Image (spheres, rainbow, N blue to C red):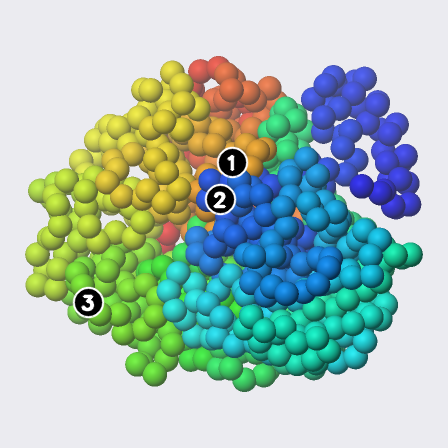
Amino acid sequence: MRRTTWLRGALRGLTATALLGAALSGPSALAADRDGFLTDLVNPFIGTQNEGNTYPGAAVPFGMVQFSPDTGHNTGYDYAQDHIRGFSLVHLSGVGCGLGGDLPVLPTTGDVTRTDNAAYAAGFGHDDESASPGYYRVGLATGIEAELTATARTGVQRYTFPATDKANVLLNAAQSLHSGVSAKVEVLDSRTVRTAITGRGFCQDTEPYTVYTVTRFDRPFTAHGTWDGATVTAGARSGTGGAYVRFDTTKDRTVEATTALSYVDAHGAAVNLRAEGGRSFDSVRDRARRSWEDRLDDVRATGGGDSLRRTFYSSLYRSFLAPNIGSDADGRYTGWDQRIHRAKGFTYYQNWSLWDTYRTQSQLLSLLAPREARDMAVSVIRISEESGWLPKWGYGTVETNIMTGDPVTPFLTNAYQQGLLHGYEDRAYRALKRNADGVPPADSPAVGREANREYLADGYAPYVKGRPHAKPGDSDYDHGASATLEYALSDAMLARMARDLGHRADAERYAARAQNYRGVFDPATGFFRARDASGAFTGPADPARSEGFHEGTSWQYQWLVPQDLPGMIDLIGGRQAANDRLDAFFAYDRLLADPAGTAREVWVNGPYDYYNADKYNPQNEPDLIAPYTYLSTGQPWKTTDVVHAALTLFTDTPTGMTGNDDLGTMSAWNVLSSLGIFPVQPGDAVWGLSTPVFDRVDLTLDRRYYPHGALTITARGTSATDRYVQSARADGAALDRTYLTTDALRSLHRLDFTVGPRPSEWGTSHPAAPPAPK
């Protein structure tokens, strides 16, 4: 890859510092400083194999465009496949179903006779493929080199062709990863092609959305045509399938083009092209790299081997890929009422995998990207105000209703607790209250808390087998037990916000409802169980074979009571009983002997094997908080044991993602757990502590939210053997608790852990445990 003047200058400036650090501190300091560019540590191919469903293509932080190759896998790119069908403009990191892939573009040579991208797909090999943040390149078996980069709202491509007078670029408007509804393509002039693509579908059918594109080439094409279905018409200027444009590359072998997106209209795409287009490929690529370098540089980790650092920074990179900008350069966006609005004083974001991200990624963004996180929260409030209801799993301009429970409440209450909703507190609370106390009407695309009537009347959401789905997406009635636990968690977090805002009666009501988790606890089995509409426990009594839980079993969901862990522990017989059950759940004895083997051979059963298990599943969201339960049972050293074993599942290879990334959820879990701070009460302001994996991490923080502007976390000598906290200090003062509040975190300059080879008494007392929200 060519290095820019900026990169060369930065490298010269860092050389002396890197060598001095190496001389003073040895190899680990060299590993920390020699990169000069943290982007060099990022491997975008991590998670592209074994259903991690990430993508290796080009994007900028939170950009609207993710320009990446599609190989035929339903979510885009699969490292095990060897043909590329096109380079498309929209992808989401780690989703479990086909989504996006809008406007696949592919360079070809010769006559254009085939319109199905599976038929004209080009072979490639990984030895002639590379990727880094903001840049992707591949040599195709056709002899064409393809390079991709991006701005926030445009994708920029450069193709180097053989010498030929038939060098083509195919723009296939009708073949996206989702279910296509309609497409229109227009050749506007000798350098410009415009499309409008309407699609739907994410795991199930959903409401349709439309994305508009305009592509501008750096020189006139010599010929063009369009197609409808399988019929190609040379010289045609419009079609419903796609278009091709042709160049003579006998002398000048390169072709560059910029494609702008808009979810508003064709004018919006043109606005975005004017605002962000017009730059050379190299210039855009260098800017994209700088934007990633600036973002990653807010977290400077010292220590750890090269593989650990590559894995960590790759996870940090993926944590900043979504949500995505949804407003055009002029501030216009399409709301969930399908009307055009204008964002004033904030950037509008879209793509909300809330069932996943509320547990990890939203908290990481509140720490490292609070300005963007604030705008994301405001965007969610605007969705409620414009469509009538808060989202559950939103894609683009529509609700998909995928997943269950009430994930938007802990998402927004987290934003409130992190101080991100200044000026929006009352608007957020009104939206949350309506969501918590009601059910969207039949004419609303949203399902919201679908089982809320029964939950409010009876204290639980019933599990109703075979109930017809009234709307596209998932149904809380299919997962009544887990929906009850998720509702109760959300009620607890909303109670805290209500109390802070002076809504005392509401606070008491929501706090009482937060205890509804007890309504699905079966004393006969000692586990949570689904209840049917009559109130009877239903499904197998064996907690490993339980029904009514979304992507999990009773074993995995028993720890999803962060609002009242002391109460849940009492239900199952007290601390000792809880520790015994946790030890069985994590196969703790075997873990001590073989952490990595236990993680891969006992915990993990397959990418989508969520059921019929009595063990921890580190691949899936309901379990993300489970290792931190030991902080509340007086055995915090076991949290470190389990977390560090789970971290071995993240590697710097294409198979190095545990489960789907789910818009940065798993990546954020890796980052937070590696730092030693974790949001143990999603939706509240409490961070659990465990042993970091790096000797030192220096965080640069936004002074508007963190007055000191920096936080240093140290754990000198931390390793696979010396991993137990012996003591902790906060700005030099002894810290005996296993948690910090957000307010305490904001006041800190330093958090220092002393580690050793054996467990200690640190954090084992009752007062040391994270408190239940009040």
- In the picture, which quadrant includes the C terminus? bottom left
Disc 3 on helix, strand or loop? Answer: loop
Mark 2 and mark 3 lie on one chain; the one further toward the N terminus is 2
Residue nearest the viewer, comparing 724 with 440: 440
Work out whether mark 3 precedes mark 1 in sequence or the reverse, and give the earlier one.
Answer: 3
Which label belongs to residue 229? none
- Residue 521 position, x and y percent, is 17, 48
Q: Distance of mark 2 from mark 1, alpha carbons? A: 7 Å
At mark 1, the secondary structure is: loop
* Label 2 with label 1: CB-CB less than 8 Å: yes
Amino acid type, callout 3: Arg
Q: What residue sits 68% from the left and 35% below the top?
A: 127
The amino acid beneath tag 2 is Gly
Q: Badge 3 local density, few (<14 within 10 Å), some, or many (20+)? A: few
- Residue 741 seen by the camera: no
Q: Where does label 1 land, which residue?
A: 655
Is 168 in front, or is 639?
168
Please state the horizontal and vertical placement of residue 404, each as a whole percent of the image: 33, 60
Instruction: Mark 2 or mark 1: name the one nearer the start of the chain.
Output: 2
Circle 2 residues within 10 Å: few <14, some 14–19, many ≥20: many
- All told, the count of numbered labels is 3
Q: Is residue 123 visible?
A: yes
Instruction: Give residue 343's position: percent from left, percent from top.
Output: 63, 77
The residue identified by callout 2 is: 52
The residue carrying pointer 1 sits among few (fewer than 14), some (14 to 19) or many (20 or more) residues within 10 Å by Cα, namely some
Q: Between marks 3 and 1, how big is the CA–CA gap?
A: 38 Å
The residue labelled by disc 3 is: 467
Q: Which amino acid does label 1 sit on?
A: Thr
Q: Which residue is located at x 63 percent, y 73 percent?
A: 232
**Is 25 on the left or on the right of 414, as rendered?**
right
Where residue 513 appears, as percent x and y from the top left, is 25, 61
